[in-house]
Amino acid sequence: MRTNKLSRYHYGVAYIEHKGVLVSTSLGTEMDNIIETMTLDYEYRLGNVPLMFENRPDNISNIFYGTSKHWWFLMQFNGYNDPFEFFNAGEEIRIPEL
């Protein structure tokens, strides 16, 4: 099990200024490599987004993993970058086995 590496910041933190505010991000070369191969590194099952969890990867993470902290992993694993554009009710998603 690789849960110790599931923090978005495990591979480092970069700081950027966005609209006058300094914010942290996990974007970087090492994270890009993880994202590119994650669908090969993890088994997954298919599921559909229930109406009550539309646009809420945090709640879906909480159901399957017992914590909302892996919301970003669900998004990346499904190739999404905006929860309000994806995770629509009825949409089929991949749920990785962690």
Image (cartoon, rainbow, N blue to C red):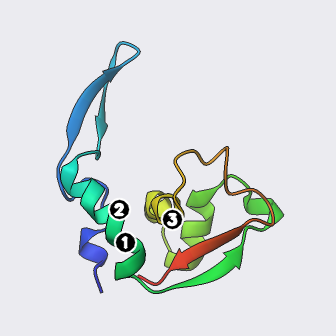
- Label 1 sits on residue: 38
Q: Distance between the Cα atoms at labels 2 and 3? A: 11 Å
Q: Are discs 3 and 1 less than 8 Å apart at CB?
A: no
Please tell me in which quadrant of the rendered image residue 64 appears. bottom right
**Left or right, residue 94 beside residue 72:** right
Mark earlier in primary sequence (2, 3): 2
Q: Residues within 10 Å of mark 2 (few under 14, many from 20)?
A: some
Q: Nearer the viewer, residue 45 or 19?
A: 45
Q: Could you tell me residue 65's position as x and y percent? A: 49, 77
Q: Nearer the viewer, residue 85 or 4?
A: 85
Mark earlier in primary sequence (3, 1): 1
Q: Are discs 2 and 1 less than 8 Å apart at CB?
A: yes
Quarter of the picture containing the N terminus is bottom left
Q: Distance between the Cα atoms at labels 2 and 1? A: 5 Å
Q: Amino acid at mark 2?
A: Ile
SS of the residue under disc 1: helix
Residue drawn at (29%, 36%), measured in percent from left and top?
24
Q: Nearer the viewer, residue 55 or 36?
A: 36
SS of the residue under disc 3: helix
Q: Could you tell me residue 54's position as x and y percent? A: 74, 56
**Left or right, residue 51 beside residue 58:** right
Labelled disc at residue 35: 2
Q: Amino acid at mark 3?
A: Leu
Residue drawn at (57%, 44%), measured in percent from left and top?
82
